[in-house]
Image (tube, grey):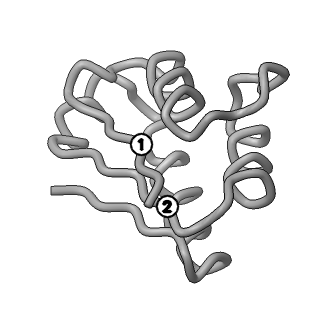
């Protein structure tokens, strides 16, 4: 199973985008924004896969308002794809 693993050091959206793109082997043309992340996760990643983010809340405080949008995106992705899981611990 493919997995992207994030930690408390992923405290900016740029770091989050970069880690997910690296771990899930996105195209070199990936643009670091929520719309492109949605498209890549929905269409380009072969399942099953997961994103694991222990201490997400800690990083989220530093990220700010976009963190809530990211969580919403990942929740919607779980509904859209039966072969994706987002795990926060």
Give the vertical position of 68 relative to 81 (above or below): above
Q: Residues within 10 Å of mark 1 (few under 14, many from 20)?
A: some
Residue at 55% of width from left, 76% of height from top? Answer: 83
Residue at 49% of width from left, 61% of height from top? Answer: 49
Q: Quadrant of residue 57?
A: top left
Where is residue 70 shown, x and y percent of the image? Answer: 52, 46
Q: Secondary structure at mark 1?
A: strand
Q: Nearer the viewer, residue 41 or 65?
A: 41
The residue that disc 2 covers is: 49
The residue that disc 1 covers is: 4
Q: Earlier in the sequence, mark 1 or mark 2?
A: 1
Q: Secondary structure at mark 2?
A: strand
Q: Are marks 1 and 2 in contact (CB under 8 Å)?
A: yes
How many dots with numbers? 2
Give the vertical position of 21 relative to 87 (above or below): above
Q: Quadrant of residue 36?
A: top right
Lateral position of residue 11 relative to residue 38, left or right: left
Q: Nearer the viewer, residue 74 or 72?
A: 74
């Amino acid at each position: 199973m493919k997995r992207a693993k994030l930690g408390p050091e992923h405290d900016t959206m740029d770091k989050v985008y970069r880690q997910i793109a690296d771990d899930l082997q996105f195209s070199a043309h990936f643009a670091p924004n929520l719309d492109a992340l949605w498209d890549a996760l929905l269409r380009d990643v072969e399942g099953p896969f997961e994103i694991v983010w222990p201490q997400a809340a800690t990083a989220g405080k530093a990220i700010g308002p976009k963190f809530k949008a990211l969580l919403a995106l990942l929740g919607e992705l779980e509904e859209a794809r039966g072969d994706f899981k987002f795990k926060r611990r």
